[in-house]
Amino acid sequence: MALQDAEHQVDTALDRPARRGLAFENTFGGVISFLRRSYSKDLAGVDLAVTGVCFDQAVTNRAGARFGPRAIREASTLQAADPPYGWGANPLETHRIVDYGDLAFDYARVQDFPAALEAHVATILRAGAGSLVLGGDHSITLPILRAHAAAFGPMAVIQFDAHSDLWPDDDMERIDHGTMMYKAVKLGVVDPARSVQIGIRTECPDYLGVNVIDTFEAHRIGPEAVAAKVRAIVGDAPCYISFDIDALDPAYAPGTGTPVWHGLSPNIVAVVLRALRGIDMKGADVVEVAPPYDPTGATAVAAAHVATDLLCLYCGCRGARE
């Protein structure tokens, strides 16, 4: 860490002179943004926009994921002064990454929320930037996928999760974090044959053609083999990664609404994500972080590391814009 810089840097999310470079601001102070990136609504020339979606009105169990984006941003300050480890490149130096702030919506008009989110993400994509979304419950992924499918066609999805979210629900007006993938497949925004779910350990009556690497298989074959299977399934299709924090075992991420034991370890996830370099990744999200159920903050720390690795993976899939 450059202590001489730490003495002078504060609130770099507001007054950073450039959109590239590390931040040496004290982790315990200042205006919080993801990895101390600049807050900006100007997407001109931006490679990746990080945005928060503070919505948890579609949960089936414990609410609290509305506080996830704030907690993930705070946890990310622990990493902001160092190049991301083990990637062989530093997108914080090479790519223009901004914190686009949070989606504004009327919490009392839940029925209007999906369209507002879809439009929010579509704005980012039209500007030529990628989106990294901090949730929020997992229902938010459906509007995000709709925006991506409109831009890129049906998406291959890599979903890290304890639950398939494929439970039947043909009422397309319902908003439910347990049925969003069912609707995404039925609406044609997801290509199930090119999609894969990793870490599943709850029952599902019909996977609708989506490939599954459950948690027993993931532990048995190891992360390198998991990544190889994922790459073979996804191929060169445009790809979206959705990471539900309950994919991790509750020992590592207790702060979530529907924890399930025998989950993935951070060791597996870190290796898998690094081994996916080269896929045609178009965007990603990290969802279901519910800080009220984790007084240690470990869940938010894990989510911040996942989000940082997703950022590295996205930037590694494409060069920086001129």
Image (tube, helix red, strand yellow):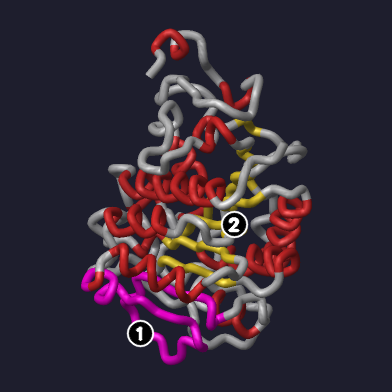
Mark 2 closeness class: few <14, some 14–19, many ≥20 residues within 10 Å: many
Q: CA distance from mark 2 to mark 1?
A: 28 Å
Q: Which residue is mark 1?
A: 203
| x then y, percent, for residue 198 | 38, 71
> Which labelled disc corresponds to residue 299?
none
The nearer-to-camera label among 2 and 1 is 2
29 left or right of 215 in image: right
- Give the magenta part as a residue range: 192-220
30 left or right of 290 in image: right
| x then y, percent, for residue 279 | 53, 61
Residue at x-position 69% and y-position 59%: 117
159 left or right of 182 in image: left
Q: In this view of the protein, which residue sits in the foreground, 154 or 204?
A: 154
Q: Quadrant of residue 172?
A: bottom right
Quarter of the rendering occupied by the N terminus: top left
Q: Amino acid at mark 1?
A: Glu
Residue at x-position 39% and y-position 45%: 305
